[in-house]
Image: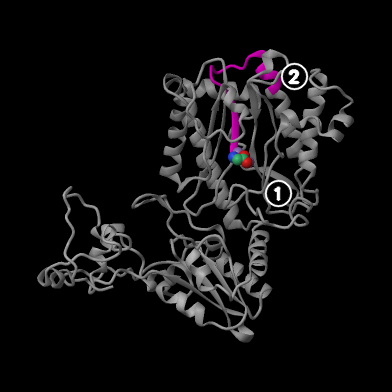
Amino acid sequence: MAVTEQPAPENPEGDEQPIKQRKNGLYPAVSDELAANMTSGWADTELRDLQPVPQAAETARRRAELSARFPGERLVIPAGNLLTRSNDTEYPFRAATEYVYLTGDQTHDGVLVLEPAGEQGHTATVYLLPRSDRGNGEFWLDGRDGELWVGRRHSLTEAERLLGLPAADVRELPDALRAGTGPVRVVRGHDAGIEAALDGLADAGRDEELRVFISEQRLVKDAFEIGELQKAVDSTVRGFEDVVKVLDKAEATSERYIEGTFFLRARVEGNDVGYGSICAAGPHATTLHWVRNDGPVRSGDLLLLDAGVETHTLYTADVTRTLPISGTYTELQRKIYDAVYEAQEAGIAAVRPGAKYRDFHDAAQLVLATKLVEWGLVEGPVERVLELGLQRRWTLHGTGHMLGLDVHDCAVARTETYVDGVLEPGMVLTVEPGLYFQADDLSVPEEYRGIGVRIEDDILVTEDGNRNLSAALPRTSTDIEAWMAALKG
Ligand code: GLY
Ligand code: MN
Ligand code: MN
């Protein structure tokens, strides 16, 4: 883009807001002397000794699988664009899972294209914004993409070394796509500009098949992914310990103190939290997705903390513990907690290769329904309760889901490969039964109302059973109390 001749706008605040954004995309006029001055005097900072990202071999294998599934078709997998939060500020960017899985890259506006290449299958190219041009002013005048404003990017040559595949200028991609011939599929929902360039060429139904295939590719994790998930869980364990240590400060403020404490760990050790932390004290624990986190934290109540660190490579943990804020469960809290623990134990025991995916859910529900009948909250026999699903008034949700780059991973996998499928070594799933008695539930005795308990662990299916990746966090009520006592000192 060229420097325009338009007069520079008034800048009464004298702040450092990039002028471009006040000017509808036009650069301000600057003196010829300054423009000339800014084009030179910059060091060569090209990084020449970059090593490939650690998952480069895995991303290449995944692209080869994709190529084999869609021979002769052009495949377009965008990273997605920045989203406006307000005016000229954006949300933190999180690249689309499909793009990350197939490239190892996380750059906004990036696009992976697999171009049919005859007998060779496909040629993969990643399209990225190159480094800012120092000669035309974009480096220092473009407030959205200029490196002076947003930081240094990798050159296309650096990106090629890092990702192990050719890189090209993304600004040339829309025209190239429009000019293309032959069948094309795009992963929709991430980049409206790319979809517009493919308008009339791609077909929503065929595109969905591409998305489904990538979702199913991710069902079984490779060794790199399992290592990353373990890192995510390990950071999450430390985040839970951080929270226990500051419960007194949360009592003096609110659930936000818990959210902020966990977030600090997530940002320092990882990329972010993998989903909005649920920091639910007292009756908020009965709201499944309580992420407002603005309530009081009271001794004597329970804290349901459901949180997960997302690693720098974007794999997330998903762990829940329900803790007595005082450090000790009341008799009724313990009774409910121990029932959920028993259900979780039954669920975890049902996770092994060859088992049906539904088995762990059924095993956990059987325990919970049995307890609810025993406690006189629902009329038996247990078989009738399960058949009619009557326990669900208090169990509310499924007992788990696949875990990986997305917290609810592989979400568009077909029913026959996921919920009606069979467990295989390398799958990672949560086992997370719960019991929730709403504060206004008149069908249960008053003392139950406002109690919610969930226990959630991240379980890897192994060759001969399973491994609990989050076993470093205690799970039994007595172990939790001892752990909290030790941390609180
Ligand atoms: N944290 C969301 C879930 O447990 O599924
Ligand atoms: Mn979960
Ligand atoms: Mn969770």
Q: Position of residue 67 (x, y in %)?
A: 63, 74
Residue occupying image coordinates x 48% and y 80%: 176
Amino acid, disc 1: Val
Res 233 → quadrant: top right
Residue occupying image coordinates x 75% and y 57%: 417
Q: Residues within 10 Å of mark 1 (few under 14, many from 20)?
A: many
Query: Is 304 above or below relative to 156?
Result: above
Residue matched to label 2: 443
Amino acid, disc 2: Ser
Q: Is residue 146 magenta?
A: no
Q: Does the magenta stretch include residue 334?
A: yes
Q: Could you say which disc has been placed on residue 461 in the image? A: 1
| Of residues 102 and 180, the one drawn nearer to the viewer in this rendering | 180
| Of residues 25 and 338, the one drawn nearer to the viewer in this rendering | 25
- Residue furthest left in the image: 33
Task: Answer whether labels 2 and 1 touch (C-beta < 8 Å).
Answer: no
Give left or right: position of 459 versus 488. Answer: right
Query: What whole-number distance in Å separates the C-alpha atoms at marks 2 and 1?
Result: 39 Å
Q: How crowded is mark 2: few (under 14 residues within 10 Å), some or many (20 or more)?
A: few
Q: In which quarter of the image is ligand 1?
A: top right
- Please state the extent of the stretch shown in magenta in the rendering: 319-336
Residue occupying image coordinates x 40% and y 73%: 171
Query: Is 312 above or below relative to 113?
Result: above
Mark nearer the N terminus (2 vs 1): 2
